[in-house]
Amino acid sequence: MRKTSYVNQEQGLTLVEVIASIVLISIILLSFMGLFMQSNKTTATSGDIVNATYIAQKEMENIYKHRIYNSPEEIVSKLNEQSRSSTPSEPEYVGNLNSWEKQKDNIRIKLKMEKDNVHPELQLTTIVVEVYEEVNGTETLKSKIENRYKLGG
């Protein structure tokens, strides 16, 4: 009968090779995890900015629709009237002179309208819509749109 020696067989992997391959795979996966996490954060931030820009654009389009009125106060009054008729729970703009604000949940929309003093002969009104988002007690400007319209016509 012939005895087989298991000591001299060199088939399979040693423990060192298995551990080395696990370490290499872990290093590769960890480096990609950082990339995936940063990509996720960037996507979330981009989504917030897109949403805020949409809100600001929608407000600017509503102002454009009501630009036939002569004063900023009349325009804000019409904006509030429009929001009451479409959505009764929608907040209204409050403020005075050239600055109005409205708050809904953690979003604050600030509206400024001022006569252009650089070229008074053009009778343009500078309109600025800013959208702020409050997160953990800190308010951050997410979007700002500025335009110039001739009011009253």
Image (cartoon, rainbow, N blue to C red):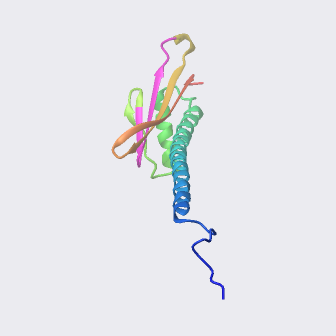
Residue 3, horizontal then vertical, whole percent: 62, 83
Q: Which residue is at 48% across, 13% downward?
A: 117
| Residue reaching furthest to the bottom | 1
- Furthest-left residue in view? 137
> What are the residue bounds of the magenta stretch?
100-118
Instruction: Decide which of 46, 14 is in the foreground and name it.
Output: 14
Q: Residue 67: x and y, percent?
A: 56, 29
Asked where in the image residue 9 lies, by quadrant, the reply is: bottom right
| Residue 30, placed above or below residue 6 | above
Instruction: Point out residue 30 in the picture as x, y percentages from the top left corner.
Output: 51, 52
Q: Position of residue 138 (x, y in %)?
A: 35, 41
Quadrant of the drawing holding the C terminus? top right
Give the residue drawn at x 35%, y 46%. Answer: 136
Q: Main secondary structure of the magenta part?
A: strand
In the rendered image of this protein, does residue 148 appear above or below residue 30? above
Residue 24 colored in magenta in the image = no
84 and 127: which is toward the camera: 127
Task: Specify the quadrant that holds the N terminus.
Answer: bottom right
The foreground one among 1 and 53 is 1
The residue depicted at 60 percent of the width and 77 percent of the height is 5
Q: Is residue 47 left or right of residue 112?
A: right
* Residue 102, image quadrant: top left
